[in-house]
Amino acid sequence: MSVSSSDVNVNSNSNNTDNITNESRTGPTILWSMLQGKSVITSDGKDLGEIKDVSDNYIRLEKGTIKKDKFWIPKYTADAYDGKHLWLLINEEELHSKHVYGDESPKGDEYTKGLESFKSSTSGQQGEYNSGFEERIRIIENYKNIRDLE
């Protein structure tokens, strides 16, 4: 899969540091659709599988070879993409207890309710929710998650 310049967005920082917004601090981003086939890693380092599909608000993952586990997770649980892996803000236990959906992507206002609840959680407060985060994910080279800081 090739990446064109329209797939990657590099935000330039303003010289006026008094008015920096989350949008200007985000840095480079990539379209969610460009992440198909990439692996997803939780904050505790667990490999959840590969991204197989991307909807407006959710990502469908598959893990396994013969008997594949297939499930949807909300985009708001993602932190950043490092060029190889999509890193999540939450650990595997929290993900499976609160944020995993079956074969079908959830419908209706479930995403909005989940997002508001997640933003107020400890993990959710670490996320960046600037305009367009449901279309693009930030890119961070040499991503360091909580395991790397111990």
Image (tube, grey):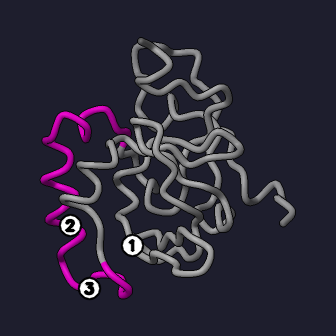
Tag 1 secondary structure: strand
Q: Viewed as shown, does residue 108 lie left or right of 1?
A: left
Q: Is residue 15 above or below residue 42?
A: above
How crowded pointer 1 is (Cα within 10 Å; few <14, some 14-19, many 20+) is rated as many
Q: Nearer the viewer, mark 1 or mark 2?
A: 1
Of the pair 150 and 84, the residue shown nearer to us = 150
Tag 2 secondary structure: helix
Seen at 68% across and 47% down, the residue is: 9
Residue type indicated by callout 1: Trp
Circle 3 is placed at which residue position?
A: 107
Can you say which quadrant of the picture contains the C terminus? Answer: top left
Seen at 54% across and 50% down, the residue is: 137
Per the rendered image, the range of residues in magenta is 102-128
Residue type indicated by callout 3: Lys
Seen at 19% across and 59% down, the residue is: 98
Of the pair 138 and 25, the residue shown nearer to us = 138
Instruction: Give the Cα distance between marks 3 and 2.
Output: 10 Å
Q: In the rendering, which numbered label is found on residue 72?
A: 1
Instruction: Give the Cα distance between marks 1 and 3.
Output: 12 Å
How crowded pointer 2 is (Cα within 10 Å; few <14, some 14-19, many 20+) is rated as few
Q: Nearer the viewer, mark 1 or mark 3?
A: 1
Q: Which of the 4 quarters of the picture holds residue 149?
A: top left
Q: Which of the 4 quarters of the picture holds residue 32?
A: bottom right
Circle 2 is placed at which residue position?
A: 112
Instruction: Give the Cα distance between marks 1 and 2.
Output: 15 Å
Q: Position of residue 140 (x, y in %)?
A: 61, 33
